[in-house]
């Protein structure tokens, strides 16, 4: 299997502060790669380095073999990297449908209607609320909206930053089930950043553990989940 | 009573101009977070360009179109070259830079076109209209002014609400970071916002210059009153900008008509201060919760 | 621990000494400057006296404005209006009461300060563009007061203000030299007072508010009162400048105090470095002298006619404002000082009247992309 997304030896940070040190992550096509670690480990910075918001001072980010270096976030989105940021990023001044339409703009005009229909089929709740303001959605519904919106852009790689944040346990399970379903049904490559390591490892294929900006472990998800010492030390369970 | 009607209609007509300026200010404020102090000066400059076209060709409507195109071009150029450097920096920088643009454009106009007051042709007749023997206090040109501004505002509203580019513009204005992640070319949207504002300003300049005569400083007062209208309507709300313009126009018309024309600007100052003190978010903007 | 306990009282005793020596230092510089200017004015001819007197007037006004913007972080493009208040107040007192010059100067400055206080209170909650807009409106609207009350204020022609050199200097003492001395003396006094204010606790409080208003409020500073005080100080300086303009010009009229004047003050302050009193001096001097020079060059070489040449200084001011702001993107917080962190930038951007939503993450994102 080829890797859809390859992060190699990335150093990145903000201003004078170095956050990531020599980070390498390989996300194989059609798999879910969980990126785990405590708060401040650099997980979000890693996603930002991939989507172009933060420029790595060293190292490479490759999408299907193409180097993404130096491109702006909007160009990297257009290249097929969809990032659902921490805190969701629902544009509350727009309606549900408008949020989705925004994502659809990256598709060809002819494909948009069909894609939207697909999304409404998969996400019934969004179909019901389509003309309401996005601000009326609950936390779990908003998370669904931003995932749907990211899917609307027809991405090659989906980056999810803490989708479980602030959500009730049952909703978290629903969302994570949805993510697994997406991978199974569409073969999408997914990079999932999560603090909720246990649930993330349950649906992931590979796990990467970050601590203080470096990778301390990369292994199949089952292996990581079984490693008690590692779990207790870095993942909190 | 007839006087009252006259003042009201005059006020609405003047209010349309303030509304156009207010709209362009709101457009730029919402889209780029900058308050463009040179909006009036830009309008003055495009009007001068139009005047030169009239002198050269004698064709008013060609000049009108030229002014609008020039407004688009100048707005886009200013955003790309100057304003782009100050978005994301301390807000005071943008204030000082746009003030710098204001006087730069005025100085340039003075050198290129001269500092004297020039008379400016109206689009339509400026003869007072009347119903029967009752003078209405407005002219055909005033009716055209109202129609033109309403049409422009309407087109803008439709574009914003229903078109793809309108959606991108709004997304950029509401949350540029998220818009970027969805592939919106935020930079281009910012430039487009300024271009559209330049267009609106150019329209306002063409409509008002026949009555104020054109000189490098002739749009100063109009701009300030347009700013006041935008504040009254709430800087976040295009509909509010139009409403604010009309309200201000009518109030100032009464003040000028009943109390003498010298107090108009003082009334404007008072109106601005009162609104800023009592309801700084404007009369029409929705509750602050929306802005969180 | 014990060494701290010993040194604190010592520092406590030292601080008043330091304050006094700062005042002495400023006064010494002021006196030195006075002697320098005295020699300068004797060495140069009558026309230079005229220029010196004008420059002194602008220096005072610019100094007040640069303190307002650079230290307290507020902006005003309406200080020309406060200059008008000072000038007209002086002219009115002169024509109706004929009091001595020194009293007129102090009173007129006081009146400008009061008007500044009124405006400052009305605008106390405004920040950034809103405040700038309100002061812009002030600058545009206030000249109309003169035409509205033309009978008292002389309308477009304005009022006269004639001073004469005091008797003890001799009958043939040059009037323009006297004007230059009066203006320079007043300017020096004002600068010394400002310098002390800048170094005082008030000055430090202003800077704290400028850098992070919320933190300043949380640490107990009365933000509104300090901001109004800053406004009053800048209005007083502008008013004094207006009086001095009247002293040298002999007349006050609406055409002396245009919007361009307000923007000229801003440009000089920006050019000299916001917050810098020394910068105010050379900024004002440059901005008074260079445009005249440019105009003369342009006219004598027939680049432009006399009429359009007046636009050249205006164009130059615009270029200065834009170029300086673009070259020093950190603006008031950085061209002179070092980098301020994103938290302070976010703090400076918050306001009662709403700003567009911006989080430190947005700032970082914006800075992270080209």
Image: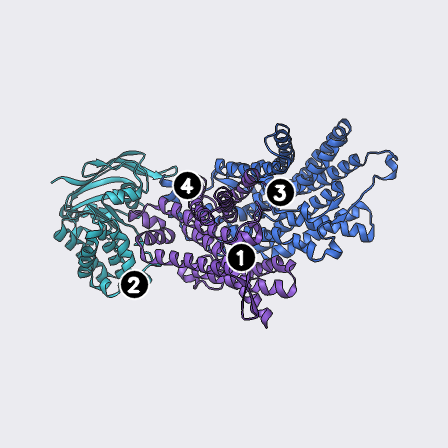
Chain colours: A cyan, B purple, C blue
Specify whether disc 3 shares its chain with disc 4.
Answer: no
Q: Secondary structure at mark 3?
A: helix
Q: Which mark is residue A137?
A: 2
Q: Residue at x 29, y 58 (%)?
A: A98
Residue A166 seen by the camera: no
Q: Which residue is mark 1?
A: B228
Specify whether disc 4 shares its chain with disc 2.
Answer: no
User: Do the residues bearing badges 3 and 1 touch, measured as CB atoms within 8 Å?
Assistant: no
Mark 3 vs mark 4, CA separation in Å: 38 Å
Q: Which residue is mark 3?
A: C198
Q: Residue at x 78, y 48 (%)?
A: C104
Mark 3 vs mark 1, CA separation in Å: 34 Å
Residue B260 image position (x, y, % from top left): 65, 62
User: Do the residues bearing badges 4 and 2 touch, measured as CB atoms within 8 Å?
Assistant: no
Residue under mark 4: which chain is it in?
B
Sort mark 3 into few (<14), some (14-19) or many (20+) by Cα contacts within 10 Å: many
Q: Nearer the viewer, mark 4 or mark 2?
A: 4
Q: Secondary structure at mark 2?
A: loop
Mark 2 vs mark 3, CA separation in Å: 52 Å
User: Do the residues bearing badges 2 and 1 touch, measured as CB atoms within 8 Å?
Assistant: no
Residue A156 image position (x, y, % from top left): 19, 45
Specify whether disc 1 shares its chain with disc 4.
Answer: yes
Q: Which residue is mark 4?
A: B80
Q: In the depicted view, which residue is nearer to us: C183 or C233?
A: C183
Q: Secondary structure at mark 1?
A: helix
Q: Secondary structure at mark 4?
A: helix
Q: In the depicted view, which residue is nearer to us: C353 or C301?
A: C301
Sort mark 4 into few (<14), some (14-19) or many (20+) by Cα contacts within 10 Å: some
Residue under mark 1: which chain is it in?
B
Mark 1 vs 4, N-terminal side: 4
> Which quadrant of the figure contains the C terminus of chain C?
top left
User: Do the residues bearing badges 3 and 4 touch, measured as CB atoms within 8 Å?
Assistant: no
């Amino acid at each position: 299997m080829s890797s859809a997304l390859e992060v190699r030896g990335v150093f990145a940070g903000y201003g004078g502060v170095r956050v990531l040190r020599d980070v390498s992550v390989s996300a194989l096509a059609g798999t879910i790669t969980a990126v785990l670690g405590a708060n401040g480990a650099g997980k979000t910075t890693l996603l930002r380095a991939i989507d172009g918001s933060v420029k790595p001072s060293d190292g490479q980010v490759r999408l299907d073999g193409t180097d993404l270096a130096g491109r702006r976030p909007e160009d990297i989105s257009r290249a097929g990297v969809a990032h659902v940021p921490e805190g969701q990023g629902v544009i509350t001044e727009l309606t549900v449908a408008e949020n989705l339409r925004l994502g659809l703009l990256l598709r060809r005009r002819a494909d948009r209607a069909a894609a939207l229909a697909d999304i409404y089929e998969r996400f019934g709740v969004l179909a019901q609320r389509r003309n309401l303001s996005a601000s009326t959605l609950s936390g779990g519904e908003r998370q669904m909206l931003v995932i749907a919106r990211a899917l609307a852009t027809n991405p090659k790689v989906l980056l999810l930053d803490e989708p479980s944040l602030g959500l009730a346990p049952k909703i978290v399970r629903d969302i994570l089930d949805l993510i697994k379903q997406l991978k199974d049904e569409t073969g999408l490559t997914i990079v999932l950043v999560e603090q909720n390591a246990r649930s993330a490892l349950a649906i992931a294929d590979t796990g990467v553990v970050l601590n203080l900006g470096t990778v301390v472990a990369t292994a199949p998800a089952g292996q990581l989940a079984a490693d008690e010492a590692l779990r207790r030390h870095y993942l909190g369970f | 009573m007839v006087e009252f009607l006259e003042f009201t209609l005059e006020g609405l007509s003047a209010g349309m101009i303030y509304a156009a300026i207010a709209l362009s200010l709101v457009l730029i404020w919402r889209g780029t977070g900058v308050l463009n102090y040179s909006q009036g000066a830009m309008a003055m400059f495009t009007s001068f360009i139009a005047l030169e076209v009239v002198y050269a060709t004698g064709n008013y409507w060609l000049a009108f179109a030229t002014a609008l195109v020039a407004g688009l071009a100048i707005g886009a150029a200013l955003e790309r070259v100057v304003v782009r450097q100050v978005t994301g920096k301390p807000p005071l920088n943008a204030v000082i830079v746009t003030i710098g643009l204001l006087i730069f454009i005025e100085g340039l106009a003075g050198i290129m076109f001269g500092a004297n007051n020039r008379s400016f042709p109206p689009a339509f007749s400026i003869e007072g209209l009347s119903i029967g023997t009752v003078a209405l206090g407005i002219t055909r040109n005033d009716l055209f002014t109202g129609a033109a501004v309403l049409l422009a505002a309407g087109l803008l509203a439709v574009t914003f609400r229903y078109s793809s580019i309108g959606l991108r513009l709004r997304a950029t204005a509401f949350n540029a970071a998220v818009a970027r992640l969805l592939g919106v070319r935020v930079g281009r949207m910012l430039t487009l916002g300024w271009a559209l504002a330049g267009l609106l300003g150019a329209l306002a300049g063409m409509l008002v210059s026949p009555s104020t005569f054109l000189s490098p400083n002739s749009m100063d007062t109009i701009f300030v009153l347009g700013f006041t209208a935008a504040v009254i309507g709430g800087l976040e709300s295009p509909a509010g900008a139009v409403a604010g313009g009309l309200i201000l126009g009518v109030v100032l018309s009464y003040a000028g008509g009943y109390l003498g024309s010298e107090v108009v600007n003082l009334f404007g100052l008072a109106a601005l201060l009162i609104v800023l003190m009592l309801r700084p978010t404007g009369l029409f903007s929705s509750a602050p919760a929306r802005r969180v | 621990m014990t060494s701290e306990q010993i040194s604190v009282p010592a520092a406590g005793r030292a601080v008043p000494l330091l304050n006094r020596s700062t005042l002495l230092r400023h006064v010494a510089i002021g006196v030195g400057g006075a002697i320098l200017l005295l020699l300068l004015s004797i060495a140069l001819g009558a026309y230079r006296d005229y220029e010196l007197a004008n420059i002194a007037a602008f220096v005072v006004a610019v100094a007040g404005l640069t303190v307002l913007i650079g230290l307290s972080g507020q902006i005003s493009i309406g200080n020309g209006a406060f200059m008008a208040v000072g000038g007209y107040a002086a002219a009115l007192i002169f024509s109706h009461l004929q009091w001595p010059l020194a009293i007129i100067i102090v009173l007129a400055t006081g009146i400008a300060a009061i008007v500044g206080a009124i405006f400052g209170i009305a605008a106390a909650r405004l920040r950034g563009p809103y405040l700038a807009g309100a002061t812009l409106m002030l600058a545009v609207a206030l000249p109309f007061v003169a035409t509205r009350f033309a009978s008292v204020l002389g309308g477009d022609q304005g009022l006269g203000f004639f001073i004469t050199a005091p008797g003890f200097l001799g009958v043939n003492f040059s009037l323009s030299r006297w004007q230059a001395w009066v203006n320079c003396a007043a300017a020096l006094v004002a600068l010394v007072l400002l310098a002390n204010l800048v170094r005082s606790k008030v000055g430090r409080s202003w800077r704290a508010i400028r850098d992070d208003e919320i933190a300043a409020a949380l640490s107990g500073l009365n933000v509104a009162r300090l901001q109004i005080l800053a406004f009053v100080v800048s209005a007083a300086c502008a008013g004094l400048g207006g009086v001095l303009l009247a002293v040298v010009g002999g007349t006050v009229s609406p055409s002396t105090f245009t919007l361009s004047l307000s923007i000229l003050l801003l440009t000089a302050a920006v050019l000299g470095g916001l917050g810098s009193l020394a910068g105010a001096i050379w900024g004002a001097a440059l901005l008074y002298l260079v445009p005249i020079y440019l105009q003369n060059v342009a006219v004598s070489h027939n680049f432009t006619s006399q009429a359009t040449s007046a636009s050249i200084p205006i164009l130059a001011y615009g270029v200065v404002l834009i170029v300086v702001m673009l070259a020093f993107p950190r603006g008031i917080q950085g061209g002179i000082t070092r980098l301020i962190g994103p938290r302070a930038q976010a703090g400076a951007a918050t306001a009662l009247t709403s700003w567009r939503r911006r989080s430190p993450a947005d700032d970082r994102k914006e800075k992270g992309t080209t």
